[in-house]
Each structure stands twice: as structure tokens, then as C-alpha cells.
Amino acid sequence: MLSKLEREFAVYAQSFFTGEESIDRNLRLKLAHSFRVRNEMRRLAQAESFSPEETRGALRTALLHDLSRFEQFQRFHSFNDAESFDHGDRSAELAASGDWLEGFGPEERDAILTAIRVHNKLAIPPGLPEQALLWSRAIRDADKLDIIPILLDYLEDPENESIVFGLSEKPELSPLVLESIMRGECPRHRDMRTVCDFVASKFLWANDLNFHWSREEFLRRGYLDRIMAHLPRTEMFVRLYENACRRLAAK
Ligand SMILES: [Fe+2]
């Protein structure tokens, strides 16, 4: 049984469906993603002993974090923020309008909107208030846990090219991406030139998981092995894989 909010969310998402399968299937993926991230969040909150209030805000953040993805794909036929808009900022803007945050006080609303805004940024900005920081850290983990298998499924489906934005199939990293990775930083989308850039950058996510539970899950679900399966077994990629394994296994 869906709650009233969940029904409204699904109706909102479906209002962007066009009847054209090549577009609608991408919208359906994001709709399902939003619900799955909410479910990941429920597990994370439980494993990390969030209070009932912390859990409530975290779950709302999770359901709404990609609220602008439907509008984005319908208008631009792309999930690439560089070609359209920053979907974290826009999702916060949409969540602030309408009744999406009914039942939350002004401080909690601000914290949820902040977490939505920062969920897709390269890093969490310094100086966030405690609640906004908790929900930001949590949504970034829950989102990553769900996105990895989606990305890998996409890569295995030659029909769907939107995920790699027409990147080159060359089995190598491009210079700017290699530099970022060597610095231990996640490369920027606009610097990516090859599919390997895109796939290998996901190893860096092992640096950016905030909760012990998320790191454990990343390992337990075999995400690193699945990422590696899409890369050539050269020394460079094997080293990136091993470093990521070590970071996740560290307590
Ligand atoms: Fe997102």
C-alpha cells in the first residue's frame, strides 16, 4: 500500500510521461530509483541507529532527492546536468514548492532542502548545521548504493546510450580524469571523454561513503567487482580496484 505522499509522488512523475517509450522508460527508471533510494535510506537509518525524527527527515529527503529528473528528461532528453540544469538545485526548488514537505517544521524543511541540493555536488560544503549534514551524508550514500547497479545495467544494455553521453570506447583514461583520480578526487563529468573515465570514476565513490553500513554494503554486494568487470585489466585499473577494496574494508 502506498502512502498519500508516495501516490502523489508517482502521479507527479507520471505527469511527465510522453507516451514515447524511449523517453518514458528513462522516467520510469528514475521513479523506481526514488523509491529504492528511500528503501536504502530506511536500512541505513536503522543500521546507523537514527532517531525516529532523524529517520523521518532522511526518508523524505530520499524520496524527493531527484524530484527534478522527470522535468529534466522530458525537456532535455538527457540526465546530463551540464546540458540542462543542476538537478540537485532544481529538485530542492521543486520540493520547496507545493506540499512535499508538509508535516515538517521550518528548520527541518531547510535541512531537507539543503540535503537535496547537495546530494549531487562533488563534496558536501563545509559548515552545514547538524541535521542538514546528517541528511546530506545519508542521501549521498543511499543514492550511490542504488546508482551503481543501475549504471552497470545500463552499460550492459547497448540500447540505452544516455548514460555514457556518447563517450569514446577507447580502453584508457583521459589526462584530466587521470589527474583527478591520482589526487583521490572524483573527476568532473565535463572532463570525461571515455567510457573508462566514467566507469573508473565510480571506484572513487569508495572514498566518499559516509557511513560504516554503506561501505560494508558496497563490498558485500560486490559493486567493486562489477565495476572492474567493465574495465580492461591493466595495471592502472587493477590498482584503482585494489585501493578501493582496501578503503571499503578499513574500519
Ligand atoms: Fe540525483
Image: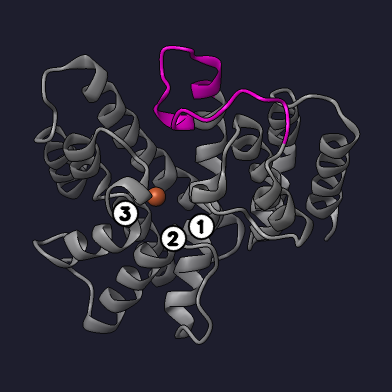
How crowded pointer 2 is (Cα within 10 Å; few <14, some 14-19, many 20+) is rated as many
Residue 174 lies in quadrant = top right
Please name the amino acid that badge 2 sits on. Answer: His
Q: Decide which of tag 3 and tag 1 comes sooner along the chain.
A: 3
Q: Are marks 3 and 2 in contact (CB under 8 Å)?
A: no
- Identify residue for label 3: 87
How crowded pointer 1 is (Cα within 10 Å; few <14, some 14-19, many 20+) is rated as many
- Write the start and end of the magenta stretch as one range: 153-172
SS under mark 1: helix
Q: Is residue 51 visible?
A: no
Q: Is residue 69 left or right of residue 223?
A: left
Q: Is label 3 or label 2 in front?
A: 3
Residue 173 versus residue 140 in the image, above or below: above
Q: Position of residue 73 (x, y in %)?
A: 24, 37
In depth, the one of 83 and 251 nearer the eye is: 83
Q: Position of residue 139 (x, y in %)?
A: 47, 58
Task: Identify the residue shown where x is 18% and y is 49%.
Answer: 5
Q: Decide which of tag 3 and tag 2 comes sooner along the chain.
A: 3
- Identify residue for label 1: 140
Q: Position of residue 102 (x, y in %)?
A: 15, 66
